[in-house]
Amino acid sequence: LVADLPTSLGALSLCLDADGEDVLMPLASGLPTHLEELKLEVGALSAGFCRALAEKLTDKLKSLTLKASSAECLDEGVGLLFEKLPLSLEALEFEVNGSDGLSDAGLSAVAQKLPIGLKTLILNFEKNDSIGDEGLGALGRQLPETLTTFRIRSELPAQVSDSGLSALVGHLPQQLRTLELRFSGRMNSFQPRPLITDVGVSAIAEKLPSKLQILLLDGSDCMV
């Protein structure tokens, strides 16, 4: 399919229930080079696929959406991909639904490579309990000043607390118009108290940009 696509194609959206590199590698290497908008939904995300995809991203690309149902070596793969994100990118959506998710180190690497002209950033790490205060703080400190929409979702945040939430919102871009924070994790015998209290919520309220128009805060089962 990819080999037969017109080289002049400007936008491409593919949803494939595939997770083998024998399928995904040819997909990445065969992508047209004039794409301005690319949306891919795949099975398992591997470091090899991320590397091959990164090599096909050009300075014509303005919007990238990458979703996967699981991942292998996610920190390594994300590092390879984000290293090559073009400066022309204005919208980025990255989603991985799996327990073997991104770590604090991986999220820190992501934050350092965000294009400086990015306007929309959407991160969804469903069923990921590896991100904690350190990763959120690193992300918050590196958010591009051009950002107008920022959405992040992480389920089962075993290590997220008031401190991490405060660090995440501590450097929100003043141009931000939409902010969505979704964190959920159930209390149990190992975590008998809410992870995020009214202290963290107050920190959000105090640091919101003056131009913000839309705020969505969801702390199901992990906030007071």
Image (cartoon, rainbow, N blue to C red):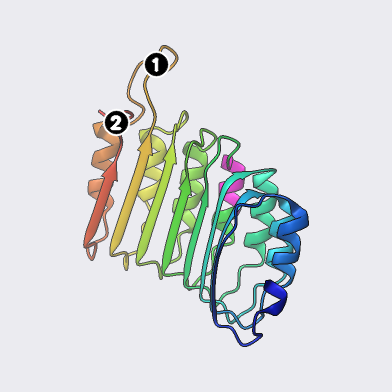
The answer to whether residue 180 is magenta is no
Q: In the rendered view, does 217 fall on the left or right side of 150?
A: left
The kind of secondary structure the magenta stretch mainly shows is helix
Q: Amino acid at mark 1?
A: Asn
Name the residue beneath numbered marker 1: 188
* Residue in the foreground of this view, choosing between 146 and 185: 185
Badge 1: how crowded within 10 Å, few (<14), some, or many (20+)? few
Q: Amino acid at mark 2?
A: Met
Residue 85 placed where, x, y %? 61, 68
Residue lying at 24% horizontally and 33% vertically, measured from the top left: 198
Badge 2: how crowded within 10 Å, few (<14), some, or many (20+)? many
Residue lying at 70% horizontally and 49% vertically, measured from the top left: 76
Name the residue beneath numbered marker 2: 223
- The magenta-colored residue range is 102-109
Residue at mark 1 to residue at mark 2: CA–CA distance: 14 Å
In the image, residue 4 above or below residue 67: below
